[in-house]
Image (tube, rainbow, N blue to C red):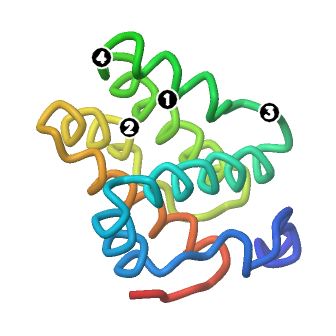
Amino acid sequence: MTSPNSLQPLSRAEAVRSIFTAVILSFLTCGIYGLYWQYMQFRTVNSWLGREEHSFVTYLLLTVVTCGIYGLYYEYKFAQSICEVQRARGLRVDDNLPLTALVLGLCGLAMVTWCIEQNEINRWYGASVD
């Protein structure tokens, strides 16, 4: 098996984020940094999948048009992609992640889902940030 670190499509500097800093910046910028953070997560997961599975523009537009309903579906789908990457790379997989993302979204805690997803992404790079 190939080491996961030898298969990193994006550099560590592009993909790894401090979760604490991302949350603080999201609050300080009234959510604008949160959009950038989400965009970077999409970009990172797409690169690890090796395909353009997730479109940030589509996600954003459909989430706005459907008053957030599409965003709930997409958090579930995005979490499934994280699990797919983990399986493909022989990493630890949390099969409950998609359901967790959906439930947190339904409770209005999407940012908690972003934190969990970022933690998983950070692990792909062997990072222990926050």
Q: Position of residue 3 (x, y in %)?
A: 81, 76
Quadrant of the image occupied by residue 28 = bottom left
The disc, 3 or 4, on the residue closer to the chain's N-terminal end is 3
Eyeballing the image, is 20 above or below 68? below
Position of residue 31 in the picture relative to residue 36 (left or right): left
Where residue 98 is drawn, which disc sits there? 2
Eyeballing the image, is 125 above or below 31? below
Residue pictured at 82% horizontal, 66% vertical: 10
Q: Amino acid at mark 4?
A: Cys
Q: Which residue is mark 4?
A: 67
Q: Position of residue 107 (x, y in %)?
A: 11, 37
Q: Nearer the viewer, residue 31 or 11?
A: 31
Q: Nearer the viewer, residue 62 or 107?
A: 62
Q: Which residue is mark 3?
A: 52
Give the distance between the C-alpha atoms of the residues marked 2 and 3, in whole angstroms.
Answer: 19 Å
| Quadrant housing the C terminus | bottom left
